[in-house]
Each structure stands twice: as C-alpha cells, then as structure tokens.
Image: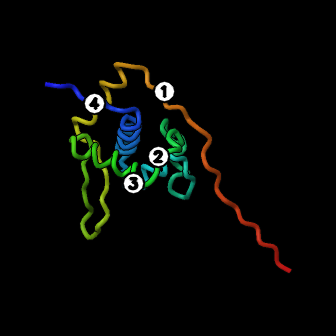
Amino acid sequence: MKKEKISLTSIKILKTVFDLNNINRYPTSIAVNYILNGEINEETILLKDLVTFSSLLSLKGRKFTTYITQLVRHGYLKYFYVEGSFQKYLEITPSGKALLMNEESKRKIVYKKLRPKKELEIYIKNK
C-alpha cells in the first residue's frame, strides 16, 4: 500500500480544525481560511492564540477550497449540518487525528506566524 504524502498546508488546515474542535467549535471552511490568513474580525479575534492563526497568508479562494475537498475525500475531515441550516461545518475524523499526530511526531512542524492583517479603521470627519 502506497503511503500518501501530506503537505504542510494540509497539516495546518487539520491542526486548525483539530484545535477548534477541542474547544467545542466547529468551523466552516471560510472560518478556517480566515484564521489561517490572519483576518481579524469579531469571531476570529478570540482565536488569535491558535498556533496556526495567521500562518498561511497566501492561500485563498478556490485553491483553499480544493485543499478542504481533498481532506474530506481522503477521510481526514468530514462535513456535518446543523438542523435547519444549510451551512456545512467541519469536524476532524479519527483518521485525521491519527495523521496529524503522526505527522507532528515524525517531524518538528513550525507553525510560523506571520503578521496578521490589521482591522481597517475608517475615520470620517463631520463638518
């Protein structure tokens, strides 16, 4: 059986979902993207202490969605729905946890934090 190689990007996505699931939070793929890109808003401001926060500034949009889809297809992540909602939430599977623990123990993974994007402030002066 051929062993799959997993990218550091996939590891960061799995680690983010794993850490959020451990604190009983189940993110959407958009929320994971915001966290990895360092987007600061009212929901992510409380998650700035995650090791993966602002560690992947270059990945956006369709390319990011492709990574999520691959992780779901390989059985490392799964989608679930809340009753009465059409929103898909992410949960790490037991095989995803095993892969993450194996990868983290096999090599030292550095989650390099980059500078988070600053919240935009707009000043309007009244006459």
The residue tagged 2 is 59
For badge 1, the amino acid type reads: Val
Does residue 120 sit above or below 111 in this rendering?
below
Q: Foreground mark, 1 or 3? A: 3
- Pointer 2: residues within 10 angstroms few (<14), some, or many (20+)? some
Disc 3 designates what residue? Answer: 62
Q: Position of residue 88 (x, y in %)?
A: 30, 59
Q: Residue 60 or 54: which is nearer the viewer?
A: 60
Percent of width and height locating residue 79: 25, 53
Quarter holding residue 109 = top left
Q: Earlier in the sequence, mark 2 or mark 1?
A: 2
Q: For the residues marked 4 and 2, what is the alpha-carbon distance in whole angstroms?
A: 22 Å
Amino acid type of disc 3? Arg
The Cα–Cα distance between marks 2 and 1, rounded to whole angstroms, is 18 Å
Name the kind of residue labelled 4 in the image: Leu
Secondary structure of residue under mark 3: helix
Q: Amino acid at mark 2?
A: Leu
Are the residues tagged 4 and 2 within 8 Å (C-beta)?
Answer: no
Disc 2, SS: loop
Reading the image, the residue beneath label 1 is 110
Residue 9, x across and y down, in percent? 41, 37
Q: Which mark lies nearer to you, 3 or 4?
A: 3
- Cα–Cα span, label 1 and label 4: 17 Å
Which residue does the numbered mark 4 point to in the structure image? 99
Q: CA distance from mark 3 to mark 2?
A: 9 Å
Q: Nearer the viewer, residue 10 or 99?
A: 10
Give residue 101's quadrant in the image.
Answer: top left
Left or right relative to 108: residue 6: left
